[in-house]
Amino acid sequence: MELPIDIKQFSEQLSIGQMVPIRTEMSFDGREEPFLSFMVKERDNLIKSLSNKPDVEMSYGCVTFDYEKKIFILFMFLRIDGQDNLTYETAFSLAEPAVLNDCNAFSNQKGIQIILVGEQEYNTIRVQLEMLHDNVAAVIELASKETDLDWSMDSFMSSLDYIQKQTAGPSELCDMFKNSGGFLKVIAG
């Protein structure tokens, strides 16, 4: 079975190791409903080396920037087979209505779909993760209560850049959130 042409074309714009959310209108169990999947660009040899059912860990982390205007970033992390080199991250700005809608769709799902895409190879991994979705719903509610959800994309990108520079990559960033209980706060100094 081939990947849909639009997914293949989109994957060609990604860098190796980049994870991005993709919204579809059909869940992996065939129901017509908004569904958020994650696409990861990876090397063909790495995709081929994975087992048919790799161990998948999905987690999240949140950071609030307490500046003149509060900014909230929701990170999603994917770790495959417990390996640091197979750890990926993506960040969401809930101030963007389409992103907020995607995150709300994700919070109502009972599973995730990960599409690993290389130049020639691909692998679709489907996993049931009940609690993650409930936790993301709680995070969205928290962000709505703590902020006005109205920061600019420039402010979001500056804040994201600041957090990403605090670590050597997705694995270290994921571990930083795990060690802090999933929540960080940055206060303007």
Image (cartoon, rainbow, N blue to C red):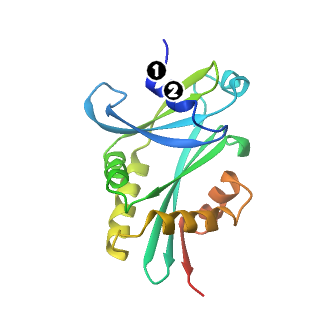
Q: Residue at x 36, y 62 (%)?
A: 140
Position in image of residue 98 (x %, y %): 33, 51
**Left or right, 10 with reference to 46:** left
Question: Which residue in the protein does label 1 denote?
Answer: 5
Q: Is residue 127 above or below residue 88?
A: above
Position in image of residue 173 (x %, y %): 65, 59
Quarter-wise, where is residue 34 in the image? top left
Residue furthest to the left in view is 32
Q: Residue at x 40, y 57 (%)?
A: 135
Q: Residue at x 62, y 20 (%)?
A: 121
Q: Residue flagged by tag 1: what amino acid is it?
A: Ile
The reply to whether discs 2 and 1 touch (Cβ–Cβ < 8 Å) is yes
Residue nearer the viewer, 104 or 94: 94
Q: Residue at x 39, y 60 (%)?
A: 94
Q: Residue flagged by tag 2: what amino acid is it?
A: Gln
Residue nearer the viewer, 42 or 156: 156
Question: Which residue in the protein does label 2 denote?
Answer: 9
Quarter-wise, where is residue 24 in the image? top left
How many residues crowd around disc 1 within 10 Å: few (fewer than 14), some, or many (20 or more)?
few
Quarter-wise, where is residue 23 in the image? top left
Q: Is residue 133 above or below residue 111?
A: below
Q: Is residue 35 above or below residue 75?
A: above
Residue furthest to the bottom in view is 189
How many residues crowd around disc 2 within 10 Å: few (fewer than 14), some, or many (20 or more)?
few
As helix, strand or loop, the secondary structure at mark 1 comes to helix
Quadrant showing the C terminus: bottom right
Residue nearer the viewer, 145 or 151: 151
Q: Is residue 62 above or below residue 40?
A: below
As helix, strand or loop, the secondary structure at mark 2 comes to helix
Position in image of residue 154 (x %, y %): 50, 65
**Left or right, 103 with reference to 154:** left
Residue nearer the viewer, 28 or 156: 156
